Amino acid sequence: MAYDEYLADRIAQCLRSKNVLFLEKKMFGGICYMVNEKMCLGIVKDELMARVGPDAYEECLARDGCTDMNFTGRPLKGFVFVEASGYDLEDDLDYYVQKAVDFNPLAKKSKKRKKKK
């Protein structure tokens, strides 16, 4: 198991309860939830990744269990990681899912890579 499958079920259920259409995509050795063809949420091992945007970024970081998303030694502003203690309760998970869903219409799509011939 490369990622927490129970958390994956909880995220999918939360998105469905909000009537959000999403696509699950394997990436980062985990799973990513794409909304409107944009990365919205994900799971890396047992951490929740949420694309909350720059406006909600500091507010999220002030919550218990939340840290900046840092893959390369430089934090990605607008993206956060949340450890299990920060999303254990349904209200806490719903908080991050809602922040990510709220930011999604403002998020930019990633550029499509051209396929090599």
Image (spheres, helix red, strand yellow):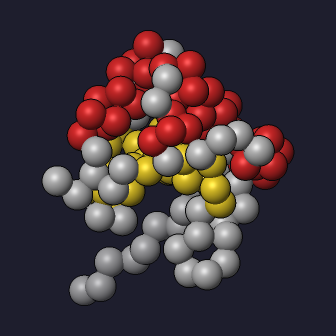
Query: Up-down: is 62 above or below 71?
Result: above
Q: Which is nearer the eye, 37 or 101?
A: 101
Q: Is residue 90 visible?
A: yes
Q: Nearer the viewer, residue 110 or 99?
A: 99
Q: Is residue 57 left or right of residue 117?
A: right
Instruction: Measuring from the top left, give residue 99's x and y in whole percent.
Output: 66, 33
Residue lying farthest to the left in this orientation: 1
Quarter occupied by residue 102: top right
Q: Look at the picture and state if 55 lies above or below 102.
A: below
Is there any visible trace of residue 104 in the rendered image? no
Q: Position of residue 101 (x, y in %)?
A: 59, 32
Along the line of sight, which residue is nearer the eye, 109 or 50?
50
Q: Position of residue 8 (x, y in %)?
A: 31, 37
**Residue, x 49% and y 23% (percent of image)?**
89
Q: 88 or 102: which is nearer to us?
A: 88
Q: Residue furthest bottom?
A: 117
Q: Give the image quarter of residue 108.
A: bottom right
Q: Is residue 111 above or below residue 24?
A: below
In the figure, residue 104 lies in which quadrant? top right
- Residue at 70%, 54% in the rendered image: 78
Relative horizontal placement of residue 70, taking residue 1 as reference (left or right): right
Q: Is residue 85 above or below residue 90?
A: below
